[in-house]
């Protein structure tokens, strides 16, 4: 499989580092500052997939061009929620496949499943309250994180109707930690996912790249992992 990287920060470089182990060849690297000639040259390389780890500011203006570049996309940039309806329309218009995720680690989706299960029970325990905390490195711009919003949706989808306190920390070099807590009068239940190595995100993105090849439509990592909820 031949891939183009859009964005070459820490995550883009990690995807490049692990690509060969997943049978993926990186045939070009683009950023928001790449020249028109560079875009043209890499577009002609014949990529199977574009893997995006750019920024929420960079993706909206380039998504149409990325859809013309390859028949499949893996979109890992965050901070563009307001652009999502238009992004879905662009992907649909081009007939490409796109896996869109704020977190590509398997553990994050195991946490989501656990949060759904516990939330459904806690809704019937009126003396329990829920909270959500996430922590990332100082350079992460969006807060709360995309994964925190995913978990908040999981709480709501499972039926939890009461307020949920959401907080964020941005400090140092934290790869990513998400905790959902349920606090009662005499005890607390805490569900936590902590990343030890950012390589897990790159490996998940490469797994998504191989999965989406040959598909069209808008997908999430739940689709890649075969997770479904009634």
Image (spheres, helix red, strand yellow):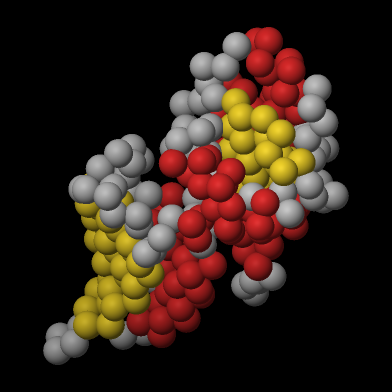
Q: Residue furthest left?
A: 186
- Using the image, determine if residue 39 lies above or below residue 106: above
Q: Position of residue 64 (x, y in %)?
A: 69, 25
| Residue 165 to residue 88: above or below | below
Is residue 101 visible in the rendered image? The answer is: no
Report the residue that reaches farthest toward the right: 214
- Residue positioned 58% across, 43% down in the render: 16
> Looking at the image, which is closer to me, 15 or 107?
15
Q: Nearer the viewer, residue 59 or 183?
A: 59
Outermost bottom residue: 186
Q: Position of residue 213 (x, y in %)?
A: 80, 50
Residue 44 horizontal/vertical position (percent): 80, 22
Q: Nearer the viewer, residue 43 or 148?
A: 43
Instruction: Name the residue: 42% across, 68% down.
Output: 155
Identify which residue is drawn at 35% across, 82% down: 122
Against 30, residue 129 (above or below) is below
Quarter of the view holding residue 59: top right
Number of marks drawn = 0
* Residue 63 in the figure: left or right of residue 158: right
Question: What residue is drawn where x is 68% and y is 18%?
Answer: 39
117 shown above or below 103 = below
- Residue 169 point in image, percent of width and height: 22, 51
Q: From where the camera sits, is residue 131 visible?
A: yes
Q: Quadrant of the C terminus?
A: bottom right
Apparent side of residue 68 relative to residue 122 in the rendered image (left or right):
right
């Amino acid at each position: 499989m031949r891939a183009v990287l859009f964005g070459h920060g820490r995550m883009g470089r990690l995807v490049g580092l692990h690509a060969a182990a997943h049978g993926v060849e990186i045939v070009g690297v683009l950023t928001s500052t790449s020249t028109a000639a560079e875009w043209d040259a890499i577009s002609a390389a014949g990529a199977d997939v574009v893997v995006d780890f750019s920024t929420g500011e960079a993706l909206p203006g380039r998504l149409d061009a990325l859809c013309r570049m390859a028949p499949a996309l893996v979109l890992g940039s965050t901070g563009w929620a307001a652009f999502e309806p238009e992004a879905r329309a662009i992907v649909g218009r081009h007939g490409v496949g796109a896996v869109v995720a704020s977190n590509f680690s398997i553990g994050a989706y195991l946490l989501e499943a656990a949060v759904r299960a516990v939330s459904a029970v806690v809704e019937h325990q009126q003396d329990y309250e829920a909270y959500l905390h996430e922590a990332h490195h100082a350079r992460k711009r969006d807060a709360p994180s995309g994964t925190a919003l995913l978990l908040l949706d999981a709480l709501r989808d499972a039926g939890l109707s009461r307020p949920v306190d959401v907080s964020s920390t941005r400090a140092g070099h934290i790869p990513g930690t998400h905790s959902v807590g349920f606090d009662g009068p005499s005890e607390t239940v805490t569900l936590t996912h902590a990343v030890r190595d950012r390589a897990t995100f790159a490996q998940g993105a490469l797994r998504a790249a191989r999965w989406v090849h040959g598909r069209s439509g808008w997908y999430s990592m739940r689709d890649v992992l075969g997770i479904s909820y009634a």
